[in-house]
Amino acid sequence: MPRPQTTITRIFCSSLREECLKAGFRSDQPRWRKGSGRRSGRWSGGTGSLITDQAYRRLRGGHHYVPREIFEDLFKKNQLRPETRKIFDEAVTGPLPKGLHKNDRPHREYTKAVLGLWYQFVERHGIRSEEMAPDQARKFIYEVLHSDDPRISLYNGRFRR
Amino acid sequence: MVDFDVKINAEGLGEVVGKKKKSKEDEDRRYDEQFNTFLRLRDRIENLLEQYGRPDSLAGLGDFSAHYDFVQSDQVKVSVANLDLFQPFIVYELQDIVKEFPGWEIVYAVTLDDHLKDWPNMGLYIRGDEIIDTLQRQYFPKKYQSIEYAGSKRGTEPD
């Protein structure tokens, strides 16, 4: 017969469940077996292997490292594969703090600089946008994130805490 | 066994956790509503401007770019790289759109590629009931210097 749960147990379990979900774990995810050293009993699969609906919703609206306005147009024209678009779409900072009602000229400079990188990237890899695979999109995002072009690094730096 | 004599008011604690959860849900709902409104307004702006110019895309820089970066403010920013898009009839059409979104505004910024560094920040703040004009026309080629918007107010860029 199952033991009746007290209010405090229910709160503890529910809060633990929330924390696990926040970290990207599933309760049915496999764990490291007993005898696996310090990892014993911990969930395997790595943090963030699953993004919950709630976490995904909170990601929406952040700064896109590859500006969405520039890749969305290619997608609309069938010049970007849906799975590649998804990679670009999910490469965001997460929600931004409330912004000022002001002009944003560095955004244009950022877009220009990312476009410059894009041209170099597609030329180097000899691909067209419609052929770009998700892994290549990830590589491109990596290059954007690690670019030493100040128009890119300074702009992205605004969103780092 | 040590008795710390700590009594936990389980019901009270449950109430606190419940309230916190509810407030988080409310915050998420507000965020989603504001973000969805932002997307609708942004798409309307882009659809209109596409009739008069080319948007930026990975295929190349165009005449304008309606930003997707959402800053939890009731505004959509547009970088405009072609002064033809500042013609009053286009601005009035944008104003007609934003009228359908009470409390929202369009930040319509001058961002000409040849003058990103040497021109100051300037643009229009287009709201349903007013247009704040921070354009510094002395920088423009002559044919754009006489552009005026009926009922607009001259302003300065915020710091």
Image: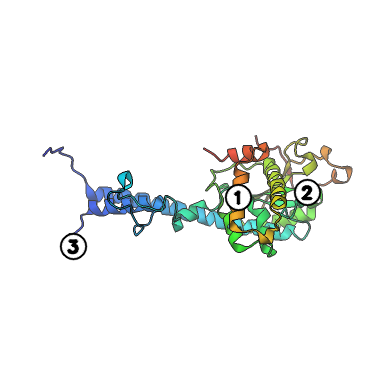
Mark on residue B129? none
Q: How crowded is mark 2: few (under 14 residues within 10 Å), some or many (20 or more)?
A: some
Where is residue A40 shown, x and y percent of the image?
30, 48
Image quarter in which the N terminus of chain B is found: top left
Tell me the SS state at disc 3: loop
Element type where label 1 sits in the image: helix
Compared across the picture, whether B66 is left or right of A61 comes to: right
Q: Which amino acid does label 2 sit on?
A: Tyr
* Residue A19 vs residue B137, the one in the foreground: A19
Give the residue pinned by disc 3: A2
Q: Quadrant of residue A101?
A: top right
**Image quadrant where one finds the C terminus of chain B:** top right
Q: How far is the residue under mark 3 from the one under mark 1?
A: 51 Å
Q: What residue type is labelled 1?
A: Lys
Between the residue at mark 2 and the residue at mark 1, the CA separation in whole angstroms equals 46 Å
Q: In this view, does B57 lie above or below A114?
A: below
Rendered image quadrant of residue A90: bottom right
Picture disc at residue A139: 1
- Numbered badge on residue B149: 2
Q: Which of B102 and A136 is in front in this view?
A: A136
> Mark 3 — on which chain does it sit?
A
From the viewer's perspective, is residue A77 above or below residue B83?
below
Q: Which residue lies furthest to the left in this view?
A: B1
Q: x, y percentage for residue A155? A: 63, 40
Residue B93 location, x and y as percent?
74, 57
Residue name at image x 76 percent, y 41 percent: B135
Q: Categorize mark 3 by other alpha carbons within 10 Å: few (<14), some (14-19), many (20+).
A: few
Foreground: disc 3 or disc 1 = 1
Front: mark 3 or 2: 3
Q: Do the residues labelled 3 and 1 touch (CB within 8 Å)?
A: no
